[in-house]
Image (cartoon, rainbow, N blue to C red):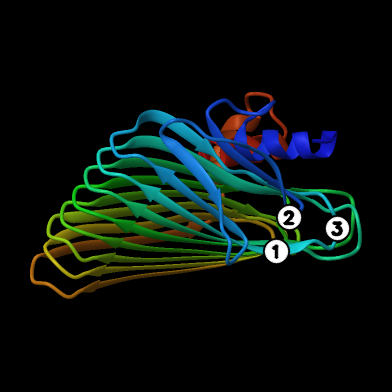
Amino acid sequence: MDEIQRTLLEQIADLHEVPTGAYNIRANGELAGRNTTANIDIITKEDEPGIDIYIKPGTKKESVHIPVLLSQTGHTELVYNDFHIGDDCDVTIVAGCGIHNGGDKLSKHDGIHTFYIGKNAKVRYVEKHYGQGEGTGERVMNPKTVVNIEENGYMEMETTQIKGIDSTKRVTEARLADGAKIVVKEKLMTHGNQYAETEFNVDLDGEGSSANVISRAVAKDNSRQLFLSKINGNNKCAGHTECDAIIMDNAKISAVPEITANHLEAELIHEAAIGKIAGEQLIKLMTLGLTEAEAEAQIINGFLK
């Protein structure tokens, strides 16, 4: 990897070098590195771009890194990655995409990740998106995540996009069986003329299943955001969706939470709040010696933690 790709890898996966354990690094549409372990296998798909990741039942305290790096202006791709997580696993999966666009052509990565999470399995999934580069070409990402969780399975999903992506549509779909649980934590910031759309659609099909979807967003300058969240309670279940957003400058934010109860014992809650930074917060920090810009940055950083 060159210096640009190393910088992207650090930003999206907190890696300063090639990781230990299982990994698959994709750079500009090509395989840049791969390692498997006794419990985790990674296989290139034959019928379409992407990989299949197989994690053996009972695998504990192992991780998989699958970063995607784009540093060639004008490169566009659509990748399909499928995760097959066996019963009784406890694993961490670190994904994400970084784009460096130094030219005048659009660079785009679309990725469809499908998870099959076995019974009693526990998965922590971390996905970061980041863009940089001095070029005028757009940096576009459209990730889609499809999650299928079997009985008593658990998934915690952390998604972060706080810099450099001009346009994105982020879609997450989940279907949960009896006792299954999903927790989604999204952090999103847009600036300039950027546009970001987030869509969650969760089907709580199993008895005792639950979902907690939480989004924290900041929109600056002339950027626009749309948050869509739908939870369908199809059994005795519990669901909660929440969007908190800070709006600044000439930005626009729309939040559309939706809950549908299709069962007498479905317990569902939705919350949405959009507002500007409170003036008293700025004044308090400025009395401590911070400039207005520094105070705003401090408040935003705390909000997105």
Q: Label 3 amino acid?
A: Thr
Q: Say if mark 1 contacts mark 2, CB within 8 Å.
A: yes
Q: Label 1 amino acid?
A: Glu
Of residues 89 and 152, the one nearer the viewer is 89
Q: Residue at x 56, y 45 (%)?
A: 95
- Disc 3 designates what residue? 73
Cα–Cα span, label 1 and label 2:
7 Å
> Neighbour class for label 3 at 10 Å: few (<14), some, many (≥20)?
many
Cα–Cα span, label 3 and label 1:
12 Å
Q: Residue at x 70, y 63 (%)?
A: 77
Q: Is residue 153 above or below residue 166?
A: above
- Disc 2 designates what residue? 29
In the rendered structure, find residue 77 and report the number of the disc placed on it. Answer: 1
> Neighbour class for label 1 at 10 Å: few (<14), some, many (≥20)?
some
Q: Is residue 70 found left or right of 282 in the rendered image?
A: right
Q: Is residue 298 found left or right of 86 in the rendered image?
A: right
